[in-house]
Each structure stands twice: as structure tokens, then as C-alpha cells.
Amino acid sequence: METEKKKFEPRKLPSVLRSEELIDKAFRRASKVSGRGRKEKAINKLSTLSNVFSDHFNRIISSHPSYQNLPPFYREIIDTIVGIGKLRKSLGALSWANSAIQKIINKGMREVKGGKDPEIVLRSVYGRISSIVNQISHELDFLIEAKQRMREIPTLSDDPVVVVAGYPNVGKSSLVAAISTVKPEIASYPFTTKKIFVGKGKIGDKIFQLIDTPGLLDRSIYKRNVIEKKAISCLRYLANCIVFIIDPTETCGYSIENQTSLLNEIKREFKVPTISVYSKSDLHKLRDRPAFSVMTGEGIEEIKSLIEECLEVQNQMTQTNQPSPPPKKSRYEM
Ligand SMILES: Nc1nc2c(ncn2[C@@H]2O[C@H](COP(=O)(O)OP(=O)(O)OP(=O)(O)O)[C@@H](O)[C@H]2O)c(=O)[nH]1
Ligand SMILES: [Mg+2]
């Protein structure tokens, strides 16, 4: 589990220039280069061009990880948010452009050294380079957008992870805000949360990460949208414990039956200790599960102690490396 959470920091990916910015930068640098005589000056300009393009392309290419070897959480979430196939294709296009440009420059150098008019050679090289860079303008735009989109991917620590899940609008973000450092958006409509939020929680002296996820509907993985898939990746790869929230008032807009069916599906699919709780206890009297309200504060301390218990059991399970039945008095489900 620890290696699966290993850090990948998309924020540290270098900036990518748009095609016109890159051409502009390279040609501006080259225009400042001098030399003794027209021939040497042209050679120096070509070598500057070569450096600017290879630096830029190589920095981008080498800073992207081998997506195949990334921990599965990052692999899956990046695939959901940007698409690993498209990333690979774009990086491949940069590689192609880099070598095509270097070939053009080398040929130009040979021509200048061989006595061809430096001005004519430079003009032709500039034209051909511009055309290559323009050919990859979509890929450059895609890499800029990919970096932007990947900013939402959280950086995780090695502290245990509690994932809060449930149908949309049941009160997941409200609970996360009540017991951790993160303050996600809370609103009375479904799918308010579209990204993964990670807050730090503390029970006694134990620190854990609390993940607020987008709402899930009870439906097949094949029908899930991008927002739901983010929640599934957290449940599948990060959760040491799941807090599943059921809103029995149905003010969330979904029936108890559908919510319970999703709970059963999650327990079957992920085999992670799961605590199921009722939210909005200020609006109902059901107490056959632990119930909490962020309005009155009822049940919040109980949920914190359930989380503590759940993480302790999960810890014992990982130490013995096999699922063990929960202790008799435990109030969470498997
Ligand atoms: N009365 C009452 N309303 C609550 C309680 N907790 C949340 N709500 C309301 O329920 C609505 C949804 O709350 P959120 O915390 O945004 O729900 P969510 O599950 O994160 O929703 P999505 O992000 O859309 O999946 C909001 O209008 C909240 O004010 C509660 O304990 N009591
Ligand atoms: Mg939310």
C-alpha cells in the first residue's frame, strides 16, 4: 500500500511553450548571436537554435515519468483526467520534432561550411523549422492543458487514508470539513465535488488523511463518468478505511435502497474495512447505524472513534498481511 501512494508531483512538470512562443524564443536568441564573419555568425546562430530546441524538448520529455511504472493510483487518475495514450503520443511527437529539427540544423551547418550563402541557408532552415514546430502545435497545446489538469491530483503523505464515499449530495464534504483541515465546497445540489480533496485529520495523537470524493451512483463502472472514476480510484488504491455515508432523509435526491445497494457493491468490490453511517441526523430519528449531523454536532465524536478503531484493525491486518475478521465488539463492517 505504501509504494502505491508514492509521490508524483505534476506541479513540478516544466512549462511548455506554445508553438509560436517557442519559435519566437529560439529565433530571438539566434538573432542576438554574433561571430567573426558571415559564415561563423551563421554557424553560431544554428548552434544556438539547436540548443534552444533540444533543451526545451528534452526537458519536457525527461520530466514526464514512465506512466506504465507509476503507482496504480496515479496511473489510473492520470488516465482518467488526461489520458495516458494521448500523453505518450504528444511526447512522441516532441521527440520526432526534436530530431527532425536537429537534422535540418546539421544539414544547414554542412551547407554553410561547404560554402553556400549563409543568409540563404539560414532563411531556408528557419522556414523548415517553423513548419516542423507548427506541425506539433496541437501536441504542445495538449501538454499545456494536461499539466493544468494534472494540478488537481493530490500529493499524498504516508499517513493512513480514510476515504469518504457515498451518493451525491448526502453530506460527504460536510463531514470532511467537520473533522479535517480541508474546507471543500458544500452545496445543496449533486456533484458539487468534482475533484479529490485531501485533508489532515487527527484523533488523539494519530494523524490520518481524509479524502473527500465526488458522489457515486449505483451503476456499472463502464457507465461511470470522469468525476465518478476519480472516486473509484481513491477507493481502489488509497483507502485504508472507508466511511460510507447514507442520507436516509433522501433530501439528497436518491433512495435509501439505491444508497444501500451502492454500499454493498463497495464492500464487495474493495474489501476495505467500511463504516456506514447516517448523515443529517437533525432531520430524522433512524439510529440503526451511527448517525451524525454537522448542524448539531451529534455523532461526530462517535465517527472519529469509529475511524480510529477501523484504522487500528486495518493496521493489524496489514501487519499480519491477511484479512482477519473484525473483533467482536467492532462496529464497522467488512
Ligand atoms: N440538515 C442537514 N443538512 C446537511 C447536513 N450535512 C450536509 N447537509 C446539506 O446537504 C447538502 C449536501 O452537502 P455536501 O456536504 O455538499 O454533500 P456531498 O455529499 O459532498 O455532495 P456532492 O459533492 O455533490 O457529492 C448541503 O446543502 C448541506 O448543507 C446535516 O448534517 N444536516
Ligand atoms: Mg461534496
Image: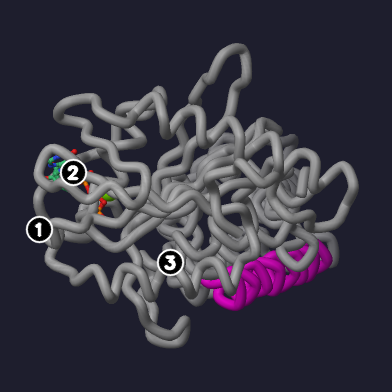
Residue 116 falls left or right of residue 276: right
Sequence-first tag of 1 and 2 = 1
Residue count near mark 2 (Cα–Cα under 10 Å), binned few <14, some 14–19, many ≥20: many
Q: Which residues are magenta?
A: 83-111
Mark 3 beta carbon near ligand 1 (under 8 Å): no
Q: Tell me the chief SS of the magenta region.
A: helix
Mark 1 beta carbon near ligand 1 (under 8 Å): yes
Compared to 147, does 19 lie above or below?
Answer: below
Quadrant in the picture for the C terminus: bottom right
Decide: marks 1, 2 in contact (CB < 8 A)? Answer: yes
Q: Which residue is mark 3?
A: 263
Residue count near mark 1 (Cα–Cα under 10 Å), binned few <14, some 14–19, many ≥20: some
Mark 2 beta carbon near ligand 1 (under 8 Å): yes
Which residue sits at x=41%, y=58%? 145
Numbered label attached to residue 185:
none
Q: Nearer the viewer, residue 54 or 114?
A: 54
- Residue 124, given in percent of the width and then of the height, sits at 58, 71
Sequence-first tag of 2 and 3 = 3
Residue 240 falls left or right of residue 294: right
Residue count near mark 3 (Cα–Cα under 10 Å), binned few <14, some 14–19, many ≥20: many
Q: Which residue is mark 2?
A: 280
Which residue sits at x=36%, y=35%? 176
Residue 63 lies in the magenta-colored region? no
Kind of element beneath mark 1: loop
Q: Amino acid at mark 3?
A: Leu
Q: Amino acid at mark 2?
A: Lys
Q: CA distance from mark 1 to mark 2?
A: 9 Å
Q: Which residue is mark 1?
A: 251
